[in-house]
Image (spheres, helix red, strand yellow):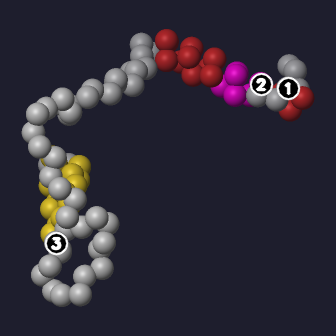
Amino acid sequence: MADLGAMPGAADWLGGILVQKLMQRHGIRARGKRRFKVTTDSRQDLPISPNLLNREFTVHEPDRVWAGGITYIATDEGWLFLAVAR
């Protein structure tokens, strides 16, 4: 057997062949990555809201500026929706 240390990447190549043969022997197939699906339609005639803050997030009075956000958290029971307003 050849010295695998003398051939860079040879062990990875042989490992890939072994994995391929084992998968074929046991009838296992790789699943390809799903394509990205665009779900937002940006072609609409709705007006764009004005930028009232103009990136000035420092305020001098309470209750003058509010911000919010939403995120999705995957759990074993399904998706959780987390919304925050400040």
Q: Residue at x 14, y 79 (%)?
A: 64
Which residue lies under the disc numbered 2?
A: 10
Which of the two labelled residues, at mark 1 and mark 3, occupies the earlier sequence position?
1
Which residue lies under the disc numbered 1?
A: 7
Location of the N terminus by quadrant is top right
Callout 2, which amino acid?
Ala
Callout 1, which amino acid?
Met
Q: CA distance from mark 2 to mark 3?
A: 58 Å
Residue neighbourhood size for the residue with mark 2, other residues' Cα within 10 Å, grouped as few (<14), some (14–19), many (≥20): some
Q: In terms of depth relative to the viewer, which is nearer, 79 or 57?
A: 57
Q: In terms of depth relative to the viewer, which is nearer, 4 or 8?
A: 8
Label 2: element kind: helix
Residue 80 visible in the snapshot: no
Residue neighbourhood size for the residue with mark 1, other residues' Cα within 10 Å, grouped as few (<14), some (14–19), many (≥20): few
Q: CA distance from mark 1 to mark 3?
A: 61 Å
Examine the image and state in which quarter residue 80 appears.
Answer: bottom left
Label 2 or label 3, whichever lies nearer to me, is: 3
Q: Is residue 27 magenta-colored? A: no
Which of the two labelled residues, at mark 2 and mark 3, occupies the earlier sequence position?
2
Which residue lies under the disc numbered 3?
A: 66
Q: Residue at x 76, y 28 (%)?
A: 9
* Extreme residue toward the bottom, this view: 61
Q: Residue at x 16, y 86 (%)?
A: 62
Residue 21 appears at what percent x and percent y?
57, 14
Asked if disc 2 and disc 1 are in contact, CB closer than 8 Å, the reply is: yes
Stretch of the chain drawn in magenta? 10-15
Left or right: where does residue 75 sit relative to residue 1?
Answer: left
